Amino acid sequence: MRSASRFRRILAALAFVALILAAWIGVSILMLPSVAPLANPGVSMTITVKDWHGKDHPFVVGPKNPRWTPYGALPAALKKAVVASEDAHFYSHEGWTTRRSKRR
């Protein structure tokens, strides 16, 4: 009888930890920013990047950035070089999964 009571307490503690973890994940997901602006490629947005010292630096992403180059203006060789340097199977895999393959 004593081991059954101990088992129930351990099970209740694990359930409590799982509930707290699920709540934390749920709140984290709800606090994510909207991705709706990403649907329009002509929209610029400002992101904040922290440097090594923790100082914030605003960074404009999109056409309002003075160094912006439209995708169509990039040379094909540059596009292929980026893909080759990142992942040889960039266009054929479904992304990162828990079953990482050793294709490199």
Image: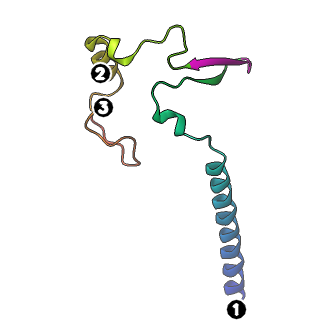
Q: Is residue 59 left or right of residue 62?
A: right
Indicate the amino acid at tag 1.
Answer: Met
Q: Is residue 56 magenta?
A: yes
Q: Is residue 49 magenta?
A: no
* Residue 104 in the image, given as x and y percentages of width and height: 29, 30
* Residue located at (63% from left, 54% from top): 25
**Location of mark 3 (residue):** 90
* Residue located at (40% from left, 15% from top): 70
The residues colored magenta run: 53-60
**Of pointers 2 and 1, the one earlier in the residue sequence:** 1
> Contact, CB < 8 Å: mark 3 with mark 2?
no
* Residue located at (34% from left, 12% from top): 74
**Of pointers 3 and 1, the one earlier in the residue sequence:** 1
Quadrant where the image shows the N terminus: bottom right
* Residue 69 in the image, given as x and y percentages of width and height: 43, 12
* Residue 62 in the image, given as x and y percentages of width and height: 51, 20
**Location of mark 2 (residue):** 84
The residue nearer to you, when weighing 95 against 45, is 45
**Location of mark 1 (residue):** 1
- Residue 64 has which mark? none
**Badge nearest the viewer, 2 or 1:** 2
The residue nearer to you, when weighing 34 against 26, is 34
Report how far apart the C-alphas of labels 3 and 2 lie in the structure: 8 Å
Q: To which quarter of the image does residue 58 belong?
A: top right
Q: To which quarter of the image does residue 96 belong?
A: top left
Indicate the amino acid at tag 3.
Answer: Phe
The residue nearer to you, when weighing 86 against 38, is 38
